[in-house]
Image (cartoon, rainbow, N blue to C red):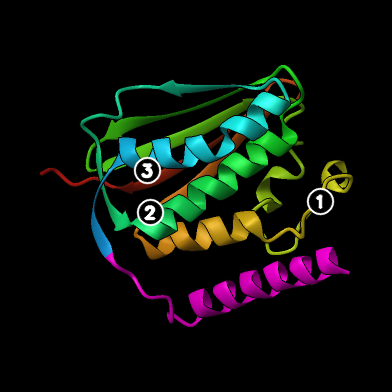
Amino acid sequence: MKDEILNMRTLIGNLLLLARSDSSAINLKKEVIPAEQLITNVLNRFMTIAAGKNIELLLSGDTQNVNIYADAKHVEEILTILLDNAVKYTPKGGKICIGTTLQKNMVSIFISNTGHGIAADDLPHIFDRFYRSADTQKYEGNGLGLSIAKALAEKNDGRLSAASEQNSKTVFTLYLPQKDF
């Protein structure tokens, strides 16, 4: 019963977040954020879970001199959703890589994982609310994580994209405005 109450609490919280996002009631506290600090904080939360599945977590690219201009809590939430999914869908012994690249005035933070990938028919729908492909039905979830991540990215003048190769890898890329010190 406790587990069900916690699941319902999470679901209600996610629905409220999406509703606030739709109505522009989300508070933004944009600031200059060092990408390395954000990525390291989120990665540290997943080290134990990844190690339990014998998943290798890799950091790629130079994150030291990369600054993002966004709401830190929102970016952390987006990265948490993406890493949680990556760990969930990466098989034992797989790899997850997170890194950054710079493109004009945007920072792209990518998270790639090895595994089954996302079917081409499912890819256009993964950011839709409550969408869960037949392949994901065996995993716990409610189909709101990626829609929340996308909404938060857009609130921060960014965007979120996904690419996948079946039985190979999946890559999610978060694009956010860059800021120099």
The residue lying at 32 percent from left, 35 percent from top is: 36
Question: Which amino acid type corresponds to the residue marked 2 in the rendered image?
Answer: Gly
**Dividing the picture into quarters, in which one does residue 8 lie?**
bottom right
- Give the secondary structure at mark 3: helix
Task: Kindly report the secondary structure that dominates the magenta region of the rendered protein.
Answer: helix
Q: Nearer the viewer, mark 2 or mark 3?
A: 3
Question: What residue does disc 3 label?
Answer: 38
User: Quick one: SS at disc 2?
Assistant: loop
User: Which stretch appears magenta?
Assistant: 1-29
Q: Residue 105: where, in percent of width, then height?
A: 22, 43
Label 2 Cα neighbours within 10 Å, binned few <14 / some 14-19 / many ≥20: some
- The residue where tag 1 is placed is 140
Q: Earlier in the sequence, mark 2 or mark 3?
A: 3
Q: Is residue 6 above or below residue 106?
A: below
- Residue 151 position (above or below residue 134): below
Amino acid at pointer 3: Leu
Q: CA distance from mark 2 to mark 3?
A: 16 Å
Residue annotated with mark 2? 158
Residue 70: horizontal and vertical position, in percent?
30, 56
Q: Quadrant of the C terminus?
A: top left
